[in-house]
Every structure is written in structure tokens, then in C-alpha cells.
Amino acid sequence: MSNSKYLRNAELVREKIGDLLPGDGPIDFNKLNYNVRQLVNTPKAISSGIPLSMSALVANYQMATFASQFQNKIMLDSSKVPTNMVGFVLATSGLGKDSTVNAMEDAMAMGYAIIDQYREDKAREQAREKAETADGDEGNWMQYYKKPEPLSNAISTVEGLVSRLNRFARAGIGMPSVYVGELG
């Protein structure tokens, strides 16, 4: 795909949601999505010195990551694109990057618990169906049970990432995310 195609997609996105995006000036808290505003306030309990720009970026990342769990696609210029986000926070050590991410993850924990319970129930149901099909009795379903992949991620190869993404696609719910606290 050519760079002009990527640029065109970016222009389409900006055209559709341009009025929701912050401008070149400071972020207007009131223009943020309601859920993002709630998350933005979460790290304030840790430190009042966390910049709105950092908190808003992390909140948007958390919302995009959560939305990606449902594997919905967005139609963008005749292509279906998964919900995703790449963000970078460049800040000095001690500003609260990791604590901001952790506070927002804690705030989202109940939603992830519901997703995990759904995935666990689905894995058990599939194991019972396999046992019934293979043995005519679902009583020994545990031998067919496969624990769902964890949503947290530690990938070391491209092949590993592709394999993991394919397993999530087959499961129909859940999507791994990658968070790196520091590069160096």
C-alpha cells in the first residue's frame, strides 16, 4: 500500500471526527468523550500534577484497547479496520506515566472481568460440546477444555504475534494489547 493511500485514510478519519480532535492549542476537557473524561480524572487521586495531555492520551488508549476486545471493525474508505490506537507519551521520569496507566487499568478492571468471564464460559461451553460430540457425554469436558489466552501481552516475535492474533480471531472476543513503559 502506498504512502498516499495511508495519507488518504488519515484524511478520511480527520474529516469524520475532526471536530472531536483537539486542535493545535491546549486540549479542551469538555470536548472529550464522557468516558474519556471520567478516565482522565482517575489519576488525579495519585497526583494533581499529571498533565491533561498525558492523561487524555492514556485515557483514549485505554478506551481504544477496551473497544478492541469486541473485535468490531470500522469501515474506512472501503476497508474494514479494527479498532486500535498507537500513542506515545514522551515525559520525564517521575511524571506519572506508569501510575496513570495503572490507575486507568484499575478503573477498567470490572469491564475486563466481565469479558474474561464471558471468555471462560465460552471455553467451557466449547469443551462440553466437544466432549458430547466425541464421547456422547459432556461429563469429561475438562479433557477438552482450553483456557482462554490472557488479554495481557508479551510477544517476542512477529510470528508469535500473528499466531496469537489468529487465536483471538477464532475465539471471537478479546484482543491482546501491547504496552511498553520505557524504551531504551
Image (spheres, grey):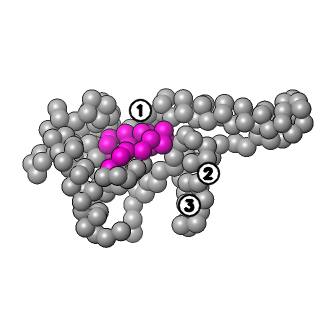
Task: Say if residue 50 shows up in the picture.
Answer: no
- Sequence-wise first label, 1 or 2: 1
Relative depth, front residue between 151 and 17: 17
The CA span between labels 1 and 2 is 27 Å
Residue occupying image coordinates x 43% and y 57%: 180
Name the disc covering residue 107, or none. Answer: 1
Residue stretch in magenta: 58-76
Q: Describe the element under mark 2 as helix, strand or loop.
A: helix
Which residue is label 2 attached to?
167
Relative placement, left or right, of 4 versus 140 is: left
The Cα atoms of the two marked residues, 2 and 3, are separated by 9 Å
Which of 174 and 80 lies nearest the eye of the viewer? 80
Q: Quadrant of residue 1?
A: bottom left
Badge 2 local density, few (<14 within 10 Å), some, or many (20+)? some
Which of marks 3 and 2 precedes in the sequence?
3
Image vertical order of residue 164 relative to residue 174, above or below? below
Q: Amino acid at mark 2?
A: Arg
Coordinates of residue 17 in the picture (x, y in percent): 21, 43
Which residue type does callout 3 highlight? Val
Q: Residue visible at 28% across and 46% down?
A: 57
Residue 107 visible (yes or no):
yes
Residue 49, given in percent of the width and then of the height, sits at 22, 42
Question: Which of the two discs, 3 and 1, sits closer to the camera?
Answer: 3
Q: Nearer the viewer, mark 1 or mark 2?
A: 2
Left or right of 21? Residue 89 is right
Kind of residue sitting beneath label 1: Ala
Q: Secondary structure at mark 1?
A: helix
